[in-house]
Image (cartoon, grey):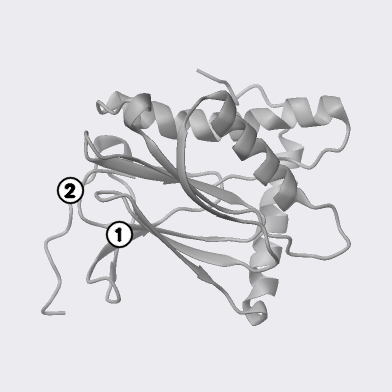
Amino acid sequence: MGDQMLTPTLLHDFSGAKLFWEPRWKCYAVKVYPGDYFVANTELVITTVLGSCISACIHDPVAGFGGMNHFMLPEGDARDDLCRSSRYGLFAMEQLINELMKHGCSRHNMQVKLTGGGRMIAGMSNIGQQNIDFILKYIEDESLNLIASDLGGDQARKVAYFPLEGRMLVNKLDHREDQRLIEAERSYQVDVNQHLDDTDVELF
C-alpha cells in the first residue's frame, strides 16, 4: 500500500463514484457499468467489461478531460423499432459529449476511441452488430474524429481508459468468463427493452 497516491479529486457530478486502488496501473480506478458514463481530468483509470455493449472513450487533449460511456441498444429488427431504440445510443453519446463540453471541451478537439460489440451467443440476434452499426453511423453523422476502434468478434473485452491522456487498453477475455457477462448483459437488455417507450430518455 506504500505506493498509493493521494485519492484523486472527482468532478462534482461524479463525486459519489466508488474508487478502488488498481495495483497493475498504480493508480485509482472507477468502474463504469451498463447505462453509465464517467468523466475526469485527473490521473485515474476508468474500467469496464464489455460483451455486446459498446464503450465510447472520448478525450480532448487541449482541455485535458476524458470520459467513457457503456451502452447497448434495445433489440429491434423492424425499422420503427430501430429508429426508436437508437435514442438510447444517442442519449448515451450526448450525455458523455455534453458533460465534456460543460468542462470546456470542444467537439472539434475530441478524439474518439471505440470498443465492444462482440457477438456473445452464436445463432441469436446480433445485438453487438446493431450497436456497432449505430455507433459508426453516429460518429460519421456528427463528424467526430475516430482515431481507434476494436469492434466485433466473439470475445468479451476488459477495457482500461486513462482520461488524462486518452489512452485506451483492451484485453480480450477467455471464453470461460463469458457466461457471467452474458447473464449480466441479458439482464440489462431486458431492462432496456422494458423501458423502450419511457419518456425519461430525452435528448438535449
Tell me the quadrant of the picture where the N terminus can be found. bottom left
The reply to whether callout 2 and callout 1 are in contact (CB within 8 Å) is no
- Give the amino acid type for the residue marked by disc 2 in the picture: Thr
Q: Position of residue 179 (x, y in %)?
A: 70, 73
Q: Is residue 92 above or below residue 40?
A: above
- Give the amino acid type for the residue marked by disc 1 in the picture: Leu
Q: What's the mark number on residue 9?
A: 2
Locate residue 181 relative to residue 186 in the image: left or right. Answer: left
Residue drawn at x 66%, y 45% is 132
Please tell me which residue lies in front, 55 or 37: 55
Residue drawn at x 22%, y 40% is 64
Q: Residues within 10 Å of mark 1 (few under 14, many from 20)?
A: some
Please tell me which residue lies in front, 193 or 16: 193
- Residue at label 1? 19
Q: Residues within 10 Å of mark 2 (few under 14, many from 20)?
A: few
Choose the circle earlier in sequence order: 2 or 1. Answer: 2
Q: Position of residue 164 (x, y in %)?
A: 24, 49
Q: Quadrant of residue 141?
A: top right
Locate residue 53 relative to residue 5 in the image: left or right. Answer: right
Give the structural element (helix, strand or loop) at label 1: loop
Q: Position of residue 174 (x, y in %)?
A: 61, 79
Locate residue 162 relative to residue 51 in the image: left or right. Answer: left
